[in-house]
Image (cartoon, coloured by chain):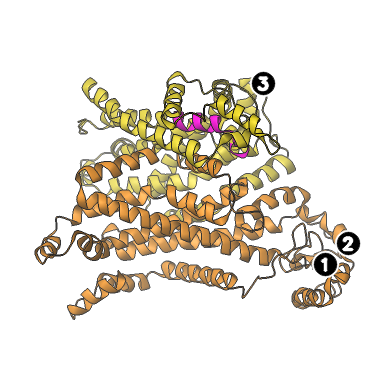
């Protein structure tokens, strides 16, 4: 659709198309650019993790149980009672022994975890006890898995679910909205009825009801639940846009040159309403990421062998009472960064695509 | 007016039928045979046949659908599959705790959000406005789970200001002791998105001509904001608050679960965990019906707020 819009712009030589104008406006928006970079960074993280370039060995137990983060380690020998961290020092010392790298030099400790992990991987299971690092970059979980790698893996899961579910919802909404808005009549009535049925059940309740019925955990299940229930909001907007566009002159012209209904709907009108879909898509990515976290937290989401931000928060809940806060903080920071970045990016995108709103 | 109400009620029939069909399709078709769920892992075919007969799932689909419609009409959904408690009794006993938390939550949240939104909309573009908006965006991006976990840990577990969780016998004790922290957490979580939303409603009105006219004729700022702008911004605000009302019936899932409040939300989560279909079915249907009624009330309220609105 983007190419279609661009080629229309190019044919008229001087006047820039919608997307070029939008890009020009977007470039001037500094907050938008920064948030765009954050989103791109997370996409990179997701891709790298998905291709097993990083964090592929997240499930290895590389550290001692509840290994504290490296950056708080130096405080421990001095005996400084850091309020919520108080229980770890004794535990760290008794299980892991003194830190070989010495206190006060965090830069040396960082690579040590990796080295130890390699040693452990090479020497097999015989020497697990000695090879487990006393501290990890951002701490360890109950089994001594690296929280940083877990967070990266969780980012991959949560983002993937959010993105695919949002694409599914946007796709359904666009097809339904196009049919309802373009044809009108009983087709419109039918989809409106469908819409009112779905919207008369509160969102979270509907999701929980479907989760109960499917009774099956897994990434695909979550994507289906979110995608199949989330199309209603986008549908209403797309339908309204189609109602507006189908009576315009360019559609009459398309009719006059013999374009089919499908062609008029998806080749002529769709590029002109795609900015609405794009902004909604990006809004729904955020909504679905949040929903996935809640679902996985409750145990109706991704499977037990998959790590997501929701399952991390679930573990973090009981860890916090024991004083191990790092998993909670890691998952929270990762999620807050992405969601804030994505929200600001959506705002900037909307401003860029629809300057009349401002 | 009366004719309008009747027509609107008549229009909800197809929607209600759709909801019934959707729920029926989900639980009787997608959900598979409940007999296997109920009989557990160790079961013989005879047992399963017995259970199927008891539940009526060995009968044709249209008979099952008719039974389901009868259940909705009479409000008798039978017993919970896991606790054998009557579903209607579950509703009756769980609604109170849900409302004890949600009514104060929604009221305080709405009042605070309207006040905050009006303030930032009034000083729009200023540093205060921008800081509040950034704060809201960041605050919104943190999962509700984190708010609950951290507040429960710090305020209740560490500082001991509130009970960590629980529910007492008396209404006053529940309201003033056990529901305090849940309400505080709930208000903090919903304040950020609501302030942002209401701010846009106020901004839409603040730039209108009538506001300038009101100022031009020497009206005080307080009166302009509280009487003229607020009344006009009230319509979308009412819409937003009304859309949240059906949620009162569904309970606050996460808050009730974390604070062990015996409300409907916690019951739904338990029911999903135990595949307790009758409970989920009943909640879904009744919340959907409540949504439709509330939508109708919302439309009537618009008329009260804005005489220009034509009911047709």
Residue indicated by mark 1? A134
Above or below for B190 versus A52: above
Please report contact status of discs 1 and 3: CB closer than 8 Å, yes or no.
no
Q: Main secondary structure of the magenta part?
A: helix
- Badge 1 marks a residue whose secondary structure is loop
Label 2 chain ID: A
Residue indicated by mark 2? A95
Q: How far apart are marks 1 and 3 (CA)?
A: 48 Å
Q: Which quadrant of the structure image shows residue B130?
A: bottom left
Label 3 chain ID: B
The residue at 68%/31% (across/down) is B166
**Outermost left residue:** A256
Label 1 chain ID: A
Above or below for A127 versus B51: below
Judging depth in this view, the residue of A205 and B49 nearest the camera is: B49
Q: The chain coloured orange carries which letter?
A: A
- Badge 3 marks a residue whose secondary structure is loop
Q: Would residue B211 be visible to someone looking at this image?
A: no
The answer to if A257 sits in the magenta stretch is no
Horizontally, residue A9 falls left or right of residue B247, namely left
Q: What stretch is highlighted in magenta?
A: B272-287
Quarter of the image with the N terminus of chain A in it: bottom left
Position in image of residue B229 (x %, y %):
30, 40
Horizontally, residue A267 falls left or right of residue A323, namely left
Horizontally, residue B289 falls left or right of residue A239, namely right
């Amino acid at each position: 659709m983007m190419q279609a819009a661009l080629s229309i712009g190019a044919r008229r030589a001087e006047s820039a198309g919608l997307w070029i104008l939008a890009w020009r406006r977007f470039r001037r928006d500094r907050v938008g650019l920064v948030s765009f970079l954050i989103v791109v960074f997370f996409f990179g993280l997701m891709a790298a993790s998905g291709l097993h370039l990083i964090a592929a060995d997240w499930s290895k137990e590389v550290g001692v149980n509840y290994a504290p983060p490296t950056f708080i380690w130096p405080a421990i020998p001095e005996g400084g009672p850091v309020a919520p961290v108080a229980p770890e020092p004794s535990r760290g010392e008794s299980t892991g022994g003194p830190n070989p790298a010495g206190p006060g030099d965090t830069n040396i400790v960082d690579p040590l975890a990796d080295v130890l992990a390699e040693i452990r991987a090479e020497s097999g299971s015989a020497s697990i006890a000695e090879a487990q690092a006393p501290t990890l970059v951002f701490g360890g979980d109950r089994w001594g898995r690296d929280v940083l790698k877990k967070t990266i893996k969780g980012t991959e899961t949560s983002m993937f679910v959010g993105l695919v579910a949002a694409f599914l919802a946007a796709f359904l909404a666009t097809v339904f909205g196009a049919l309802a808005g373009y044809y009108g009549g009983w087709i419109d009535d039918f989809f409106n009825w469908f819409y009112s049925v779905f919207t008369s059940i509160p969102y979270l309740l509907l999701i929980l009801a479907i989760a109960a019925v499917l009774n099956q955990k897994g990434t695909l299940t979550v994507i289906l639940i979110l995608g199949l229930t989330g199309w209603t909001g986008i549908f209403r907007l797309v339908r309204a846009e189609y109602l507006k566009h189908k009576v315009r002159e360019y559609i009459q012209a398309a009719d006059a040159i013999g374009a089919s209904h499908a062609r008029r709907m998806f080749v002529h009108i769709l590029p002109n309403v795609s900015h609405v879909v794009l902004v909604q898509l990006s809004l729904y990515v955020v909504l679905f990421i949040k929903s996935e976290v809640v679902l996985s937290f409750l145990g109706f989401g991704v499977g037990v062998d998959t790590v997501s931000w929701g399952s991390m928060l679930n573990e973090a809940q009981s860890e916090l009472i024991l004083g191990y806060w790092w998993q909670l903080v890691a998952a929270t920071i990762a999620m807050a960064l992405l969601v804030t970045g994505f929200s600001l990016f959506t705002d900037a995108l909307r401003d860029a695509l629809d300057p009349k709103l401002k | 007016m009366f004719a309008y109400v009747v027509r609107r009620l008549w229009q909800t029939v197809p929607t209600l039928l759709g909801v019934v069909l959707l729920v029926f399709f989900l639980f009787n078709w997608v959900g598979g045979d409940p007999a296997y769920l109920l009989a557990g892992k160790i079961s013989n075919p005879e047992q399963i046949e017995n259970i199927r007969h008891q539940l009526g799932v060995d009968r044709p689909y249209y008979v099952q659908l008719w039974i389901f419609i009868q259940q909705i009409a009479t409000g008798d959904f039978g017993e919970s599959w896991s606790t054998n408690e009557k579903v209607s009794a579950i509703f009756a006993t769980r609604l109170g705790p849900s409302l004890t938390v949600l009514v104060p939550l929604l009221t305080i949240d709405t009042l605070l959000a309207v006040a905050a939104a009006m303030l930032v909309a009034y000083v729009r573009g200023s540093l205060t406005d921008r800081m509040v908006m950034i704060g809201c965006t960041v605050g919104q991006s943190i999962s509700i789970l984190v708010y609950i976990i951290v507040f429960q840990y710090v305020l209740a577990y560490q500082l001991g200001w509130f009970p960590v969780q629980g529910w007492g016998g008396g209404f006053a004790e529940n309201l003033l002791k056990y529901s305090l922290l849940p309400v505080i957490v709930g208000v903090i979580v919903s304040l950020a998105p609501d302030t942002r939303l209401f701010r846009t409603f106020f901004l839409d009105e603040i730039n209108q001509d009538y506001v300038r006219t009101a100022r031009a004729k020497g009206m005080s700022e307080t009166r302009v904001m509280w009487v003229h702008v607020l009344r006009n911004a009230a319509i979308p605000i009412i819409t937003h608050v009304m859309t949240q009302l059906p949620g009162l019936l569904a309970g606050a899932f996460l808050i009730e679960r974390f604070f062990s409040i015996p409300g409907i939300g916690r019951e739904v989560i338990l029911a999903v965990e135990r595949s307790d279909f009758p409970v989920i079915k009943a909640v879904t249907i009744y919340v959907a019906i409540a949504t439709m009624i509330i939508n109708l009330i919302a439309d009537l309220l618009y008329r009260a707020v804005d005489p220009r609105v034509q009911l047709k």
